[in-house]
Image: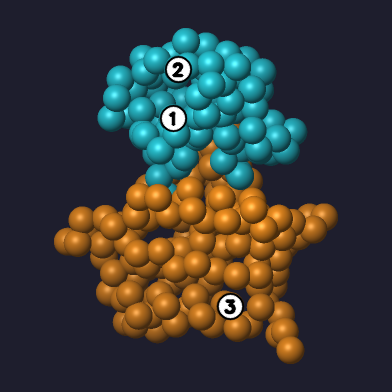
Chain colours: A cyan, B orange
Amino acid sequence: MASIKIPTPLRAYTGGQAVVPVSGDTVKEVLQDLTSQYPDLRQHIFDGDKLRSFVNVFIGQEDTRFRDGLETLVDEADELRIIPSIAGG
Amino acid sequence: MTVIISTDIHAQIRRYLEGTFPNEGGGFLIGKLENEHRIVTESRFVKNSFETEEQYHRYLMESGAYQDAEDEADARGLSLLGYFHSHPNHPAVPSEFDRVHAWPHFLYLIVSVREGEAVESLAWELADNRDRFYPVALEEIKVN
């Protein structure tokens, strides 16, 4: 089963868990599984059906935005990670 | 909830942001969560990687900075509490751009820098429903 590392601020919605086991064949399915386990996460990751502009999903060291985005394929052994772009103005 | 920061760390942050004026600067706040308090034990300055001509009103951390800071904090049993950034010649109040790019349960320390002098620091946190920031008490303590 793949796993996903939760960024520190969002661990408030996963009961403090930093890493959550997830299932799914694509990034989209993995995030659907994650947000079905922890529904309060959804609004902070998604804006409608799209990832929020500052939310990035990595597989290993690779930003899936530069692969196939939400359709990027996920292997069972993959370690995913949600990483925010920190921006202000 | 109160944010507790030492006089020294707060002064280091203010000096750093005075140095980035007239552009925005920023970095991370790392420390401990104790009861309802967030205790800042260290800061980490991170270069502004927004387009140069926009840096007077925009800040973007360079790629990889978040992963490095979070991994280090996790490995040391600390927490990545939040981040600070400056508002050159503007109040220490979150902008709409700040709100859109924010998460709850993360501390946003904003420092107003007027003509090169840090004049005000205010702490904020995003509401769970994302509709607004609310102010957080900032307590400065002297550590010997």
Residue type marked 3: Ile
Query: Residue B89 in the image: x percent, y percent?
Result: 34, 72
* Labels 2 & 1 near each other (Cβ < 8 A): yes
Based on the displayed image, in which of its 4 quarters is residue B117 positioned?
A: bottom left
Q: Would you name the residue on which mark 1 appears?
A: A59
Look at the image and tell me whether residue A60 can be seen.
yes
Q: Would you name the residue on which mark 3 appears?
A: B9
Residue type marked 1: Ile
Other residues around mark 3 within 10 Å, as few (<14) / some (14–19) / many (≥20): some
Based on the displayed image, in which of its 4 quarters is residue A1 positioned?
A: top right
Secondary structure, mark 1, is strand
* Labels 3 & 2 near each other (Cβ < 8 A): no
Residue at screen point 21% across, 56% down: B51
C-alpha distance separating marks 2 and 1: 8 Å
Most foreground residue, A27 or B116: A27
User: Is A78 on the left-hand or right-hand side of B4?
Assistant: left
Most foreground residue, A54 or B74: B74
Q: How many marks?
A: 3
